[in-house]
Image (spheres, rainbow, N blue to C red):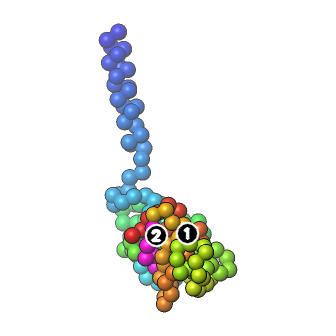
Amino acid sequence: MKVFLRIFAILFVLLSALPAFCQDVSESGLALPRMVSIRADNINARSGPGTKYPIEWVYKQRGAPLEIINEYELWRQVRDWEGSTSWIHKTRLTGRRFIKVITPGESNIYAKDEYDAKVIAKVEDGVIGEIKKCPKGSEFCLIKFDTIEGWIAKKNVFGVYENEVIK
């Protein structure tokens, strides 16, 4: 009976620790997934984590947001606004946060973080803007588009999570 209890206790301890071993832990120690942006124009996107892998396409828009979904040594597997995945060297990415407008046609830029506020501008899909803040509990983020600064609904952009707060 004592042997049975010991085996049961050992199995219980091992099985209770199993979830900790199954969690995604990035090599950098940063959370996965997370948003970043492209550091410069003309960034190679590869099919695997290294220069021996072929270039699948080239990102040409500085500041375009990407979501890091995996890490391998100095390489980051990213997902873009179209859902495509590729690998980019970490030095080609920045932690500065930008968004890309993804709704077809035009999106409103508001004077305040509410739909009833005055529309101060309109932006077309594909436009990139720098995130200034995304308040807690708000559906909007304050974004700087070149010379215009205003509020845009999170649902219209890629580069910020639905409930994410940025101060």
- Which callout, 2 or 1, points at the residue further toward the start of the chain? 2
Residue 126 sits in quarter: bottom right
Image quarter of residue 114:
bottom right
Q: Position of residue 118 (x, y in %)?
A: 59, 81
Position of residue 142 relative to residue 24, above or below, is: below
Q: How many marks?
A: 2
- Tell me the SS state at disc 1: helix
Q: Is residue 116 left or right of residue 144?
A: right
**Main secondary structure found in the magenta portion:** strand
Residue 72 position within the rendered picture, expressed as x and y whole percent measured from the top left? 40, 60
Q: Is residue 44 inside the magenta stretch?
A: no
**Extreme residue toward the right, this view:** 105
Residue drawn at (38%, 52%), measured in percent from left and top? 25
Residue situated in front as seen by the camera: 95 or 155: 155
Magenta-highlighted residues: 128-135
Q: Which residue is mark 2?
A: 134
Q: Amino acid at mark 1?
A: Lys
72 is higher (above) or lower (below) than 1: below
Residue at point 36% right, 60% down?
30
Identify the amino acid type marked 2: Cys
* Distance from Cα at disc 2 to Cα at disc 1: 9 Å
Residue 54 vs residue 157, the one in the foreground? 157
The spot of residue 6 in percent (x, y) is 32, 18
Q: Which mark is residue 154?
A: 1
Label 2 neighbourhood size at 10 Å, few (<14), some (14-19), many (20+)? Answer: many
On screen, residue 82 above or below 33: below
Asked if disc 2 and disc 1 are in contact, CB closer than 8 Å, the reply is yes
Q: Quadrant of residue 49?
A: bottom left
* Residue positioned 48% across, 78% down in the render: 143
**Can residue 39 be seen from the camera position used here?**
yes
